[in-house]
Amino acid sequence: MSNKIGTNIGVDKLIEESGPYVSWALQQRKEFMELRLDQEQEIREIYENMSKRISLQVAEGNLNTFDQARLRRIQQEMKTRIDDLNGQLTINFDNYIKRNIQAGSGYSKKITLNLIDRASITRVSKSIVKDTFYRMNIDSAEAMWSRSRYGLKLSDQIWNKNQNYRKSINNILTSGVASGEDCLTVARGIENYVKKGKKSFAKDYPNMMARMPGRIPEDISYEALRLARTEMTSAYGMGTTKAAHLNPATKGIKYILSASHPKYDICDPITMADDYGLGPGGYPLDKAPLYPFHPNCLCIMTTINEDPEELVARLRAWEQNPSSQPDLERWYQENYAA
Ligand SMILES: [Zn+2]
């Protein structure tokens, strides 16, 4: 339950920072957390279903010994299965990348549309704002797939995770041959491991565990889940940052320390530093450290916004005389001028 308390501490600061936009900020955080849970469940299901298909094929041998010939037949189909796995995960990642970018950019979009409404300006129309955010979301999703991190594109990172999945399943199959188990036992062993993890497998299938030729991870989905969390947080961060440029209220980015932070790490100094007069964790757009700060980082990212009353007055003044508000004129020229 300490995680829950930690989350609330972070959310308190989010409430404080978002001021008049608090309901949108909380809704955005909730959306991000829900996307995370939904995606994790889907990824687990993808691996469980694939493993089920492999175990069903093994189980066809019934009480016959699971021998080298049967192992080879399973292995022959493995390449097609891994291709299938890559395809399914790619679709899953693409879907959630788009939804996380949208979730990240939604806050600035709502603020921008609201300000235009309240100021009743016409130089920037609501439909131009909507179009600009829409195009930004699409460009960001493409950028997520085309960029390299650690020298690898996202598609290669997904491929690597599935090669490790293949190796783990192969280690279990090989251990079944080495311990002379029947096919049904090996099939149940795979399902036990995929659903309950390595500890349960080691307890229920000690003979196979003892003859395991290489390592198997505690949780077969762990690597893919970790990659998903990191990439989706990054997509959310990209959406937040790019949308912040399109929002005239943006004064900077704010990072807030959050849940599951049992020990001091890189997130502490980043969320504590107050180097730009924007408060702890506050950074101008071009100085904000890249988010997330580490895999599984749950720090909250939001934007620092100008007071809406003042900004509405400034937007009206800008519409009358653009040169009276040079910062708003720059915002317009950089983002909305045709
Ligand atoms: Zn963090």
Image (tube, rainbow, N blue to C red):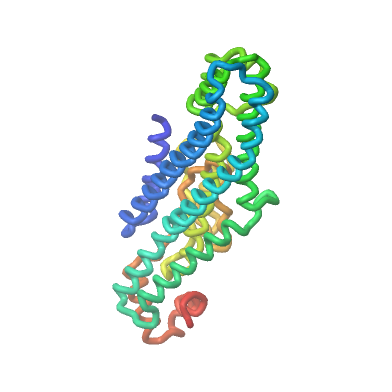
- Residue 34, position as x, y percentages in the image: 39, 45
Image quadrant where residue 6 sits: top left
Toward the viewer: 154 or 124?
154
- Could one spot residue 279 in this view of the protein? no
Q: How many marks?
A: 0
- Residue 140, position as x, y percentages in the image: 53, 62
Toward the viewer: 188 or 312?
188
The N terminus sits in image quarter: top left
Relative to 97, is 326 above or below?
below
Relative to 333, is 210 above or below?
above
Q: Is residue 302 left or right of residue 201?
A: left
Q: Residue at x 64, y 29 (%)?
A: 170
Q: Residue at x 29, y 73 (%)?
A: 118
Q: Residue at x 39, y 60 (%)?
A: 107
- Could one spot residue 58 in this view of the protein? yes
Relative to 270, is 41 above or below?
above
Q: Residue at x 51, y 21 (%)?
A: 188
Toward the viewer: 229 or 300?
229
Toward the viewer: 255 or 129?
129
- Residue 135, position as x, y percentages in the image: 48, 69
